[in-house]
Amino acid sequence: MTIGRLNIKNKLSTPESKATVYINYSEEKRILEVEFKGGKLYHYLGVETQTWKNYKDLVIQGESSGSFVTTHIKPFYKYKEIN
C-alpha cells in the first residue's frame, strides 16, 4: 500500500529552517511527515502525539527543525521515502 502526502490539517511551514520545508502529522496514523529542502519527503512511523507537539512547539519558537529530526526522530523511528 502506498501512502501519499498527509492531509494538510497539521501542516506547518518551516521557512526559517535550513533543512526542512514543512512538517506535518497525522494523529490517527501516528505518522510524522517531513519535506526536506532537497525535495525529499519522508514519513516517520509510530511517532507519538506528544513528540509531534514538542516538535511543533520548538519550531514555532524558532528552534531548528532539522536538529530535532536528527536527534529526536531519525534514531528512534522507522521511515519511508514518499515519491
Image (cartoon, rainbow, N blue to C red):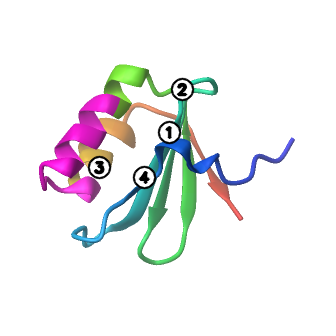
Task: Label 4, secondary structure: give it.
Answer: strand
Task: Label 2, secondary structure: give it.
Answer: loop
Instruction: Give the quarter of the image for residue 5.
Output: bottom right
The image quadrant where one finds the N terminus is top right
- Dot 4 crowding, Cα within 10 Å, few <14, some 14–19, many 20+: many
Residue assigned mark 2: 27
Image location (x, y in percent) of residue 32: 50, 40
Residue closest to the eye, 79 or 15:
15
- Dot 3 crowding, Cα within 10 Å, few <14, some 14–19, many 20+: few
Q: Which three-letter amino acid code belongs to the residue tagged 4?
A: Ile
Cβ atoms at labels 1 and 2 below 8 Å apart? yes
Cβ atoms at labels 4 and 1 below 8 Å apart? yes
Magenta stretch bounds: 53-66
Q: Mark 3 vs mark 1: which is more N-terminal?
A: 1
Instruction: Give the quarter of the image for residue 19.
Output: bottom left
Residue assigned mark 3: 70
Residue assigned mark 4: 23
**Relative side of 30 to 83, left or right:** left
Q: CA distance from mark 1 to mark 2?
A: 6 Å
Residue closest to the eye, 6 or 20:
6
- Dot 1 crowding, Cα within 10 Å, few <14, some 14–19, many 20+: many
Image location (x, y in percent) of residue 67: 22, 53
Question: Which residue occupies 56% across, 61% down?
Answer: 41
Image location (x, y in percent) of residue 14: 31, 63
Residue closest to the eye, 2 or 26:
26
Q: CA distance from mark 3 to mark 1?
A: 17 Å
Q: Which three-letter amino acid code belongs to the residue tagged 1?
A: Tyr
Q: Which three-letter amino acid code belongs to the residue tagged 2?
A: Glu
Say if the magenta span includes residue 58: yes
